């Protein structure tokens, strides 16, 4: 083979290899096993939602049950492009905690789903990584509330609990950052089904970008504030996305949950979003649900 022929063949091989790599699905690890919510019900749904996009392959790492020894629970975070946390339970070993920190700092993606924001209240680095959390006796010592007031973000250091919500209720989400890859192209306002409307989340909130909020009315057990429900955090070289929606499998049928979740996982894994906004995405007044 001549040198020119060799170069041509090598160039074609390189192009084909690059295309194959670009089309390779992202590797996702869902972590569960303990949670104050029904993780055994929601994890299979989350897995299906990701796999149906054809953009992801999904594994699940399930910890020992609550009350049992978790010292041997050592997921191989580094083998994945993004970790989805559906975990809220006993503290992990220092080795496992450090492995997650190193993974995200080094460029790994992390997605915090719903009540996973209540995990590890005493783990300082975890709270910095997720930006805002709730419950677990969190209060003003853990950081401010993040409020949307008069068109801008306000860091509210008022004393009080971290985490709470009123009864299940439908609510409208409002996009606050339309130019982020996760929210780009979505309607400015869209409806979600009856769900827990998280409020009073607080934490270090460093390098945090609020993507969408929902108003939590006082007469329905809320704070009378526009609460951040979709947001991102930059942590080291890594990308963190938090989606506070989705109490049970029923609420995971809402397109208002599905699309930001799917797009958020892709962004956390790659920094980009290739998914188009589906035709069944809800508008400002009516919910959209998939069977």
Image (cartoon, helix red, strand yellow):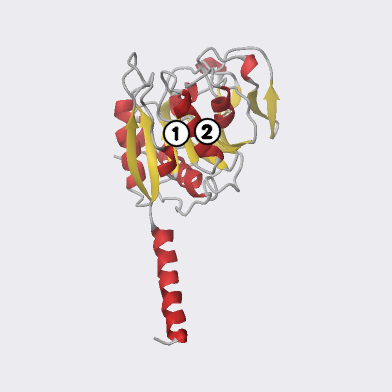
Across and down, in percent, residue 23 comes to 40, 59
**Image mark count:** 2
Return the residue nearer the eye: 191 or 262: 262
Across and down, in percent, residue 2 comes to 43, 87
Across and down, in percent, residue 97 comes to 48, 27
Frontmost of labels 1 and 2 is: 2
Quadrant of the image containing the N terminus: bottom left
Q: Secondary structure at mark 2?
A: helix
Residue topped by disc 1: 192
Residue at horizontal 42 percent and vertical 22 percent from the top: 88
How packed mark 1 is, by other alpha carbons closer than 10 Å (few <14, some 14-19, many 20 or more), is: many
Quadrant of the image containing the C terminus: top left
Residue topped by disc 2: 101
- Asked whether residue 160 appears in the rendered view, the answer is yes
User: Contact (CB < 8 A) between labels 1 and 2?
Assistant: no
Residue at horizontal 42 percent and vertical 60 percent from the top: 21
Q: Is residue 238 left or right of residue 53?
A: right
Across and down, in percent, residue 202 comes to 59, 22
How packed mark 2 is, by other alpha carbons closer than 10 Å (few <14, some 14-19, many 20 or more), is: some
């Amino acid at each position: 083979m001549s040198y020119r022929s060799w170069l041509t063949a090598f160039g074609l091989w390189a192009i084909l290899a690059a295309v194959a790599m670009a089309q390779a699905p992202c590797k996702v690890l869902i972590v569960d096993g303990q949670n104050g919510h029904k993780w055994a019900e929601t994890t299979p749904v989350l897995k299906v939602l990701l796999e149906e996009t054809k953009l992801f392959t999904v594994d699940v790492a399930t910890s020992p049950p609550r009350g049992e020894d978790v010292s041997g629970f050592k997921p191989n975070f580094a083998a994945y492009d993004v970790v989805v946390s559906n975990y809220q339970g006993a503290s992990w070993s220092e080795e496992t905690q450090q492995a997650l920190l190193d993974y995200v700092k080094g460029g790994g993606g992390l997605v915090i789903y719903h009540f996973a924001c209540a995990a590890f209240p005493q783990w300082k680095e975890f709270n910095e990584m997720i930006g805002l959390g709730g419950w677990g006796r969190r209060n003003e010592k853990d950081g401010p509330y993040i409020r949307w007031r008069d068109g801008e973000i306000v860091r509210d250091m008022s004393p009080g609990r971290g985490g709470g919500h009123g009864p299940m209720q439908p609510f409208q989400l409002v996009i606050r950052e339309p130019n982020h890859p996760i929210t780009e192209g979505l309607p400015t306002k869209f409806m979600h089904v009856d769900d827990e409307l998280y409020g009073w989340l607080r934490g270090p909130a460093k390098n945090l970008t609020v993507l969408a909020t929902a108003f939590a009315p006082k007469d329905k057990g809320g704070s009378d504030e526009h609460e951040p429900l979709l947001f991102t955090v930059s942590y080291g070289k890594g990308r963190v996305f938090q989606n506070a929606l989705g109490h049970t499998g029923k609420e995971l049928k809402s397109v208002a949950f599905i699309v930001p979740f799917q797009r958020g996982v892709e962004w956390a894994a790659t920094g980009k979003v290739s998914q188009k906004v589906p035709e069944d995405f809800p508008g400002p007044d009516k919910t959209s649900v998939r069977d």
